[in-house]
Amino acid sequence: MTSMYEKRVFSSRLLSCLIAISMFFLILSCSLLFRVGDNSLVPRSIYNLIVVDRGSIEPESDSGSNPVKAAGSCDPNQAVLKVFMYDLPPEFHFGLLGWTGSANQLWPNVGNFSEIPSYPGGLNLQHSVEYWLTLDLLSSLIPNVRRSCTAVLVHNSTQADVVFVPFFSSLSYNRHSKIEGTEGKSTNDILQERLVEYLNGQDEWKRFGGKDHVIMAHHPNSMLIARWRLGSAMFVLADFGRYSDEIANIDKDVIAPYRHVVRTVDANNSPSFEERPTLVYFQGAIYRKDGGVIRQELYYLLKDEKDVHFTFGSAGGGGIRKASTGMAASKFCLNIAGDTPSSNRLFDAIVSHCVPVIISDEIELPYEDLLDYSKFSIFVPASDACKNGYLINLLRGVKREKWTEMWENLKQIAPHFEYQYPTRPGDAVDMIWKMVSRKIDPLHYRAHRKNRYNMSQQFLNSR
């Protein structure tokens, strides 16, 4: 009898052991799967939302009525910015991602994650602001998506503060700027020409000459044809490096951050001063043209210094993974002007909590009217940086306490540079809409003041 009981106990314990081992391998497999997801074409933010935050999307009510309003969703009437968006054909936006809807369907169902087309990975992601802004506007029409409510979509353009042009211009340049076969023009050029013709024919454009329109041209080579004919609009740009002042300037346009490509370091587990053995980190293209020649000069000044990592690198061959590891193990990360004043490297450094050292005299920075970059970055004039010994002595002279203060500030502001869907208060999309709002207020004032007599006469004639 005792033997039978001992066998049952043994069998029970063996079964429990097998279940525990199975669960361990299941959890390990899932962890590895989603680590692979970092390098997939599915945006990490959508992976995180599906895996970690399913509670963000409220289920439909059991009664079969309309979906319940998500907890924390806002009243559209309280939104900072009301946006009218043109119903451009999919070939201008999600069609460039290979998305095809049903007959007469212009937009994917953004309330269902499985129906949202993913943006291409790698360096394509750095200019994906067009994708995130458009998704955010579309989600404002979905009652059960919990999101920041800074901007909402309206169907009547007369009720809108701005008019949004949903052309994925950076993706169009990256994927379709080459002439294929016997065609005389690239798809990118054809789309730009069609966009100009379309906008010039719209009443909304004619109303203020396009000044209340928001056009995304984040890649420095995007909209090369159209920018000259649409320069009255508000551009969302990476910088002003390849624009003349009359086409783009800080008075009317918005500087948006690149979408970082390295992994975000968890603020609660960010390596401290002692845990970052590398003093200075730079990995990227070294030989550049125009203002980027300074990279070559700095390379020869720093390459033989101890505790300095200054090497050539690219996104391919595991370059992004290496940069993620290298930046998280470094105290200072160099952001040096390249072909244009800005680069994605600054935003990779921010989310790595690696204190940025900005060597780019002409750079314009996102949200600089709200953020004091000197609290978490070091600015060095290019002329000083190129002096023998200047930069390395400057950085070696930064005390642990001062570095830690900047590191703590980086952890606080890093969420402002995260693109995600649905958007959250204070993230990159939310901050961009707020910048648009601040640009549009004086624009409306000037436009209304200029048209005061014309508008008054039109009002009187309509009575």
Image (cartoon, helix red, strand yellow):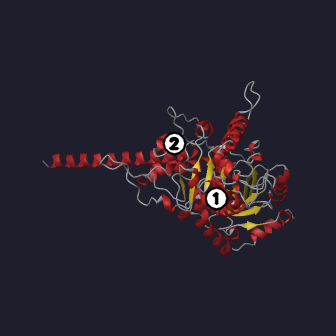
Whether 286 is drawn above or below 384: the answer is above
* Mark 2 and mark 1: Cα distance apart in space: 25 Å
Q: Position of residue 178 (x, y in %)?
A: 74, 34
The crowding category of the residue bearing disc 1, from other C-alpha atoms within 10 Å (few below 14, some 14 to 19, many at least 20), is many
> Of circles 2 and 1, which is in front?
1
Whether 336 is drawn above or below 187: the answer is below
Q: Taking the image as drawn, is residue 424 in sight? A: yes
Q: Position of residue 235 (x, y in %)?
A: 70, 52
Q: Taking the image as drawn, is residue 349 in sight? A: no
295 or 94, nearer to the observer: 94
Q: Quadrant of the C terminus?
A: bottom right
Whether 54 is drawn above or below 358: the answer is above
Q: Which residue is mark 2?
A: 116
Q: Which residue is mark 1?
A: 436
Name the residue at 73% across, 25% down. 181
In this rendering, would 393 be left or right of 154? right
Whether 45 is drawn above or below 277: the answer is above
In the image, what residue type sits under mark 1?
Val
